[in-house]
Image: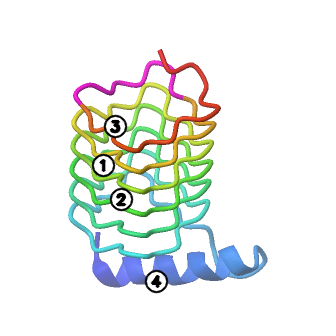
Amino acid sequence: MNVDILKQILKEHEEWVKDNYKGKRAYLCRADLRGADLRGVDLYGADLYGADLEGADLYGADLGGADLSGADLRGADLKGAYLSGTYLGVAYLRGANLGVANLEGADLRGADLRGANLGGANLGGAYLYDTKFFPISLQKIKLTHTKKIW
């Protein structure tokens, strides 16, 4: 995706997050964002269905309530990202870094997390039915009130 177009979409989305009557919700379905530098961006509630974010840097990004179903996040850096209430159904997160990420209440049904780093992540209340985990780093992971792990 063109960097200038992406910057405009992010700017309009930021305005939309602050006031739903201004700006415009980010609609990035099936967008090619491979390797994109999205550190700390606010994509709260954005539509990223099927987006290709392989190797993207989303360190500390706010993706709460976003739709990332079917998204390709292989090898993405989501360390410290806010993913509470995010829909990640059947997303590909193989080898992704989700260390200390907040995935509280996230829907990960059918997601592929094999080889991902979840060290220190909060998965409290997350939906994990049919999620593929192993092999995975589960050090210091919080799994309180998760729903249907296996």
Q: Position of residue 119 (x, y in %)?
A: 34, 48
Using the numbered discs, state the Cα–Cα distance from disc 4 to disc 2 in whole angstroms: 22 Å
Left or right: where 75 falls relative to 118: left
State yes or no: discs 1 and 4 in contact (Cβ < 8 Å): no
Q: Residue at x 52, y 41 (%)?
A: 123
Secondary structure, magenta segment, majority class: loop
Viewer-nearest of discs 3 and 1: 3
Identity, as a three-letter code, of the amino acid under mark 4: Gln
Q: Residue at x 51, y 47 (%)?
A: 122
Q: Which labelled disc corresponds to residue 138?
A: 3
What span is in magenta? 128-135
Using the numbered discs, state the Cα–Cα distance from disc 2 to disc 1 in whole angstroms: 9 Å
Using the numbered discs, state the Cα–Cα distance from disc 1 to disc 4 in whole angstroms: 22 Å
In the picture of the structure, the residue carrying the numbered disc 2 is: 78
Viewer-nearest of discs 2 and 3: 3
Question: Relative to the observer, which residue lies in front, 120 or 80?
Answer: 120
In the picture of the structure, the residue carrying the numbered disc 1 is: 73
Q: Which labelled disc corresponds to residue 8?
A: 4
Q: Earlier in the sequence, mark 2 or mark 1?
A: 1
Identity, as a three-letter code, of the amino acid under mark 3: Leu
Using the numbered discs, state the Cα–Cα distance from disc 4 to disc 3 in whole angstroms: 38 Å
Q: Earlier in the sequence, mark 4 or mark 2?
A: 4
Q: Earlier in the sequence, mark 1 or mark 4?
A: 4
